Amino acid sequence: MRAVRTLALSGAAAAALASQAHAGGFYLQEQSVRGTGRAYSGEVADQGPESLWWNPAAIARSPREAYVGASAIFVQSKVENTGSTITYPGGVTLPVGGEVAGYNPIQNGAVPSFAVSTPIGDRFAVGLSLAAPYNFTTRYSRQAWARYDALDSRLTTADLQLTGAMKVTDWLDLGVGVDAQYTDAKLQTAQPNLSPALPDGISQLSGSGWNYGWTVGAQAHFDRLSLGASYRSAMDHDLSGRVFVGGLLGPLAAGNTDASGSASFTTPWIATVGARYRVTDKLTLDAQAQRFGWSEFNAIRVQTGGTTQVLAQGYKDTTSGGVGADYAVNDRLTLRAGVQYDPTPTPDAARTARVPDGDRWLYAVGATGRLSERTQIDAGLTYIDFANSDVHHDTIFYPGTPAAITTALRGSVKGQGYVMAVGLRTQF
């Protein structure tokens, strides 16, 4: 029974964290309201503290300015069972029972963003920004077909960046930033007992931790053209917390426990290039591409009770791209629009139900209104069209013991999303 207890404990932590991290959609772009209005197509080449997440050089020529914004995210989705099975000891395979469809498992939420910068003399500037790059909440019922992959999930991050920038020449700016990122997670998964007539047990992983990274960037400014490039480092995440397993019955009851645990994984580096070209005094065209080093997310390491599990991940590097335009109607109103393609890094053969994800197109419109000489208000609206995708997730519970149970979850995913954002910028 000691083997069952150890494997139930480490397996619960491993399955919970692996599932939450198995979603390309856990990265959020919504760190700028101005960017929302043009589908994040020109941020690396734009100026001001609102662009600090994309380029630390963005404040080198900016006046003293503060920005605050919030984005409300709404997702409509359906995750449907298409033939999931569970295999009990002895080789008996049955369909996974319960609700055959989950509606809107991805919960609506709000993403705040904040930044402030100030020049120091004629050539230098410093800035401080707060972003929330990795956040999601999903929820399935205890009777959902996806319960052996995911029940309740919550991942919250807060990234605090301290930035320094320099106007090197009349046309070249450089910047560097250091990031402190706090991560908090709580993840639940159902665990089967040895008979389909018995109720499921439950496992829960909760943990938090501080982690650190850096970013560098440059901007080049010419008569009508601004170019930007930046690199954000990969970040090693170490979470410490607790693993709870309860509701296991009979021979599996030895696996019920409440113990300390930890997990580690790496989020990707991000390389960004972009340009803004002022066609006329009113019209500016925007373009931006980002390369995500998702292959850094190659394994999750979970430690519980002296046991370490290494879980391989099948993520692939991706490239997103967007184009947009800003049009100054007059000196008090600017309109903008944009479109972006953002592929998922999740391989089709290893997609889970915890954050069902697929390739997506973003279509956006936005505006900036000048309230006074020093204050502007931004607004943006984005429609997100998710490509249909499939859930394909296999799990072995209690591996290496006579009680091993295998689930093979198969499902289809459909969805669309909306983002509504509003922000305020003011010079002081």
Image: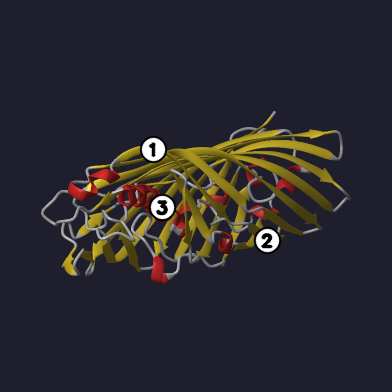
Of the image marks 1 and 3, the number of the one nearer the N terminus: 3
Tell which tag, 1 or 3, sits nearer the viewer.
1
Residue 305: image quadrant is top left
Left-right relation of 93 to 49? left
- CA gap, disc 2 and disc 1: 48 Å
Q: Position of residue 330 (x, y in %)?
A: 63, 47
Find residue 274 and name its label.
2
Q: Position of residue 315 (x, y in %)?
A: 50, 65
Find residue 95 and name its label.
none
Q: Is residue 368 above or below residue 88?
A: above
**Mark 1: secondary structure:** strand
Q: How is the image coloured?
A: secondary structure
Q: Residue at x 19, y 46 (%)?
A: 249
Three-letter code for the amino acid on which mark 1 is drawn: Ala
Q: Residues within 10 Å of mark 2 (few under 14, many from 20)?
A: many
- CA gap, disc 1 and disc 3: 14 Å
Q: Is residue 410 above or below residue 35?
A: below
Q: Residue at label 1?
A: 259
Q: Residue at label 3?
A: 14
Q: Position of residue 232 (x, y in %)?
A: 66, 53
